[in-house]
Image: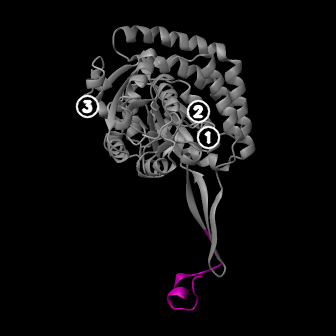
C-alpha cells in the first residue's frame, strides 16, 4: 500500500533539489523520455488494450460515458503526438531563472523579479493516459515535482507509460528521486487534498463532478476548469461558408473534448437564409440539434432547447442553437451561460470582431477559427497540463509559464531602511 504522506514529503524534497537542475540535463532527459516511449510503444499499446477491454464492459453497463471511453483509447496518432510534444517542450526556451524585471530602486540597490518553479504539483486526471507524458515533460522542464493520480479505467496504460518515463529518468544521476510519482486509489485523492503542507498546486483534468469535488475539498490552490461550455456566434456579417466549416469542425472533429462547441448563436438576419443550411450540414455529420422557438417554428423537426441546455456541456455530437437579436445579446448570453473557456465570433466586420473579443469574458476569444484550437500544443507551448478558466496566475492552456511563479531578489551592500526614513538617502524615481 502506498504511503501518500511519504510520497508528498519525497516530492517536496525533490522539488528543492530540482532548483539546481541545468537546462542541458532537463532537455537531455526529455529527449531520452521521447525515445524510450517510442521504442516501447508496443508495451503501451498492449497495456491500453487491456484497459479498453475492461472499459468496454463499463461502457455497456453505463458506468462510464462514451466520451470517456474515446479519451481512453491510445492509438498511433496519439502516441506520435505524445513523442513529438515531449521533443517540442525540450526545444522551448528555459522557463526558470528568467529575469522578468530589473531596476535600481536606490543608489547601489538592485531589484530583480526572477521566474522560479511552483514546487510540488498534483495532477488528478481521468481517462486520457497521454496526459502523463505532457505533464511530466512540462514539470521537468520547469523543475517542478509532480504527483500524478490517474483514473482506474486507465491503470494499465498509466503504469506502463510511467514506468518507461521513470526508467529513462533513472539514467540521469542529477535528477532527484521522487521528482515524478504515480498513485492509484480513490482514497489517495482524499489524502492528496489534505497535503497543503507539501503540495503547492492541484490541477484536475476530468469531469465536472471531479473538478468541483476537488475545489470544494482542499485548501490547496486549484488550477483548472469545471465546464467547457464553448460558443460560436455567427454574426450578420459572417462569411457563411466559413461559418459552416468552422461549426462542423468545432462540434465534430472531437466531440468529447472540452473545447468542442456546445452552443451556436446566430444573428436574426440569418434565420431564414442560413440556419436551414447550417442544420442540414450538422445533421449530415450525425449531430443532434436542440433549438430555440424561432428555429423550431421554421424547422419543426428539430428538438426544443430548454433553459438547462444553454448551460450544458454535451461532450457528444449534440449542439444547441439560438437566434439572437444583436451582437450584445450574443455577448450577454455567453457571459451568462458560458464557462469562460473558449468562444468565437464568425464575422468579416473587424469592428464587431474586436468588440466581441473585448467584451466576452473567457480565457480564449477567437475570430473566424474553430474552438478546437484551444490547446497548448496548437498554441506552440509544446504541451499543456490543462486549460484554466481561473483569473489568477494562469489562464487558458497552461504550459511552461503557467507552471512557474516568481521571486524577488534584492541586491544591496549593507543598506538599511532607517537611512531612508531619516532622509539620509532617497529612492530613485
Residue holding disc 2? 134
| Callout in the foreground (3, 1) | 3
The answer for how far apart the CA atoms under marks 1 and 2 are is 11 Å
Tell me if residue 227 can be seen: no
Residue holding disc 1? 381
Q: Residues in magenta?
A: 410-429
Q: Main secondary structure of the magenta part?
A: loop
Label 3 CA crowd tier, 10 Å (few <14, some 14–19, many 20+): few
Is 328 in front, or is 143?
A: 328
Residue drawn 46% across and 39% down? 344
Residue drawn 37% across and 17% down? 64
Q: Quadrant of the C terminus?
A: bottom right
Whether residue 414 appears in magenta in the rendering, the answer is: yes
Which element type, helix, strand or loop, lies under badge 3?
helix
Residue 343 lies left or right of residue 160; in this view the side is left
Q: Position of residue 415 (x, y in %)?
A: 60, 81
Label 1 CA crowd tier, 10 Å (few <14, some 14–19, many 20+): some
* Of the image marks 3 and 2, the number of the one nearer the N terminus: 2
**Res 104 quadrant in image:** bottom right
Residue drawn 53% across and 24% down? 129
Which element type, helix, strand or loop, lies under badge 2?
helix
Is 409 in front, or is 402?
A: 402
Whether residue 153 appears in magenta in the rendering, the answer is: no
Q: Position of residue 182 (x, y in %)?
A: 52, 29
The answer for how far apart the CA atoms under marks 3 and 1 are is 35 Å
The answer for how far apart the CA atoms under marks 3 and 2 are is 34 Å
Is 402 above or below relative to 157? below
Is 394 above or below relative to 77? below
Q: Position of residue 103 (x, y in %)?
A: 63, 72
Residue holding disc 3? 308
Residue 356 - label: none
Is 339 in front, or is 75?
A: 339
Amino acid at each position: 500500500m502506498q504511503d501518500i504522506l511519504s510520497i508528498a514529503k519525497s516530492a517536496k524534497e525533490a522539488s528543492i533539489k530540482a532548483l539546481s537542475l541545468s537546462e542541458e540535463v532537463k532537455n537531455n532527459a526529455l529527449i531520452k523520455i521521447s525515445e524510450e516511449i517510442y521504442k516501447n510503444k508496443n508495451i503501451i499499446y498492449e497495456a491500453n488494450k487491456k484497459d479498453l477491454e475492461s472499459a468496454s464492459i463499463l461502457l455497456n453497463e453505463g458506468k462510464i460515458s462514451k466520451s470517456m471511453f474515446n479519451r481512453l483509447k491510445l492509438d498511433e496518432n496519439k502516441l506520435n503526438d505524445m513523442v513529438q510534444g515531449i521533443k517540442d517542450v525540450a526545444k522551448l526556451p528555459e522557463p526558470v531563472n528568467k529575469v522578468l524585471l530589473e531596476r535600481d530602486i536606490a543608489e547601489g540597490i538592485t531589484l530583480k523579479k526572477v521566474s522560479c518553479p511552483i514546487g510540488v504539483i498534483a495532477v488528478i486526471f481521468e481517462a486520457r493516459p497521454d496526459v502523463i507524458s505532457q505533464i511530466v515533460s512540462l514539470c521537468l522542464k520547469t523543475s517542478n515535482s509532480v504527483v500524478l493520480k490517474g483514473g482506474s479505467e486507465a491503470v494499465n496504460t498509466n503504469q506502463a507509460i510511467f514506468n518507461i518515463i521513470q526508467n529513462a529518468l533513472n539514467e540521469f544521476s542529477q535528477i532527484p528521486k521522487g521528482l515524478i510519482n504515480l498513485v492509484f486509489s480513490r482514497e489517495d485523492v482524499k489524502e492528496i487534498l489534505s497535503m497543503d503542507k507539501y503540495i503547492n498546486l492541484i490541477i484536475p483534468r476530468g469531469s465536472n463532478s471531479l473538478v468541483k469535488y476537488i475545489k470544494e475539498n482542499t485548501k490547496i490552490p486549484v488550477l483548472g476548469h469545471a465546464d467547457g461550455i464553448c460558443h460560436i456566434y455567427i454574426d450578420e456579417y459572417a462569411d457563411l461558408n466559413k461559418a459552416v466549416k468552422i461549426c462542423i469542425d468545432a462540434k465534430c472533429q472531437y466531440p468529447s473534448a472540452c473545447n468542442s462547441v456546445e452552443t451556436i448563436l446566430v444573428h436574426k438576419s440569418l434565420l431564414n437564409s442560413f440556419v436551414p443550411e447550417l442544420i442540414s450540414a450538422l445533421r449530415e455529420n450525425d449531430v443532434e440539434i436542440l433549438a430555440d422557438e424561432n428555429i423550431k417554428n421554421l424547422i419543426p423537426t428539430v428538438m426544443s432547447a430548454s433553459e438547462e441546455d444553454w448551460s450544458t456541456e454535451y461532450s457528444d455530437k449534440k449542439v444547441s442553437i439560438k437566434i439572437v437579436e444583436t451582437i450584445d445579446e450574443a455577448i450577454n448570453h455567453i457571459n451568462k451561460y458560458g464557462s469562460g473557456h473558449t468562444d468565437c465570433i464568425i464575422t468579416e466586420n473587424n469592428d464587431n470582431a474586436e468588440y466581441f473579443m473585448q467584451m466576452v469574458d473567457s480565457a480564449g476569444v477567437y475570430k473566424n477559427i474553430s474552438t478546437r484550437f484551444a490547446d497548448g500544443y496548437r498554441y506552440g507551448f509544446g504541451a499543456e497540463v490543462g486549460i484554466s478558466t481561473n483569473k489568477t496566475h494562469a489562464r487558458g492552456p497552461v504550459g511552461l509559464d503557467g507552471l512557474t511563479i516568481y521571486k524577488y531578489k534584492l541586491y544591496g551592500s549593507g543598506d538599511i531602511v532607517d537611512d531612508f526614513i531619516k532622509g539620509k538617502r532617497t529612492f530613485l524615481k
